[in-house]
Image (cartoon, grey):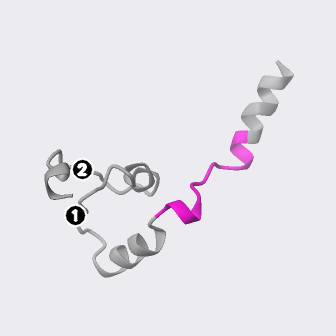
Amino acid sequence: MLAGALGVAAVHVREPRPSVQATPRAALDALLSRRPHARILDDPEFGGYLIFRHVPVFVDPRITVYG
């Protein structure tokens, strides 16, 4: 029981964060600073990061056609 409580406390102390090298943070910050309510065409590679940043995501299934 103590181990479970410590595990929950550890998660709340340090929130998991995505790697800075693997995210489009600068690009997303620049876009949102210029157009805060812009619709963003998502790429499956960055979908998790956009969800993490609370950006509504939509992955167009035709993305393989356009590359």
For label 2, the crowd category at 10 Å Cα-Cα, with few meaning under 14, some 14 to 19 and many 20 or more, is: few
Residue 50 image point, x, y percent? 39, 56
Farthest right residue in view = 2
What's the CA distance linking mark 2 and mark 1?
9 Å
Residue 34 image point, x, y percent? 31, 81
33 is higher (above) or lower (below) than 47: below
How many numbered circles are shown? Answer: 2
Q: Residue at left 81%, top 32%? A: 6
Which numbered marker is on residue 58?
Answer: 2
Q: Quadrant of the C terminus?
A: bottom left
Q: Quadrant of the N terminus?
A: top right
Q: Is 18 positioned to the left or the right of 36 in the image?
A: right
Q: Residue at left 26%, top 68%? A: 37
15 is higher (above) or lower (below) than 26: above
Farthest bottom residue in view = 34
Q: Residue at left 31%, top 72%? A: 36
10 or 47: which is nearer to us?
47
Read off the residue under disc 1.
Answer: 39
Which portion, as a residue range, is magenta? 11-23
Residue 39 image point, x, y percent? 22, 63
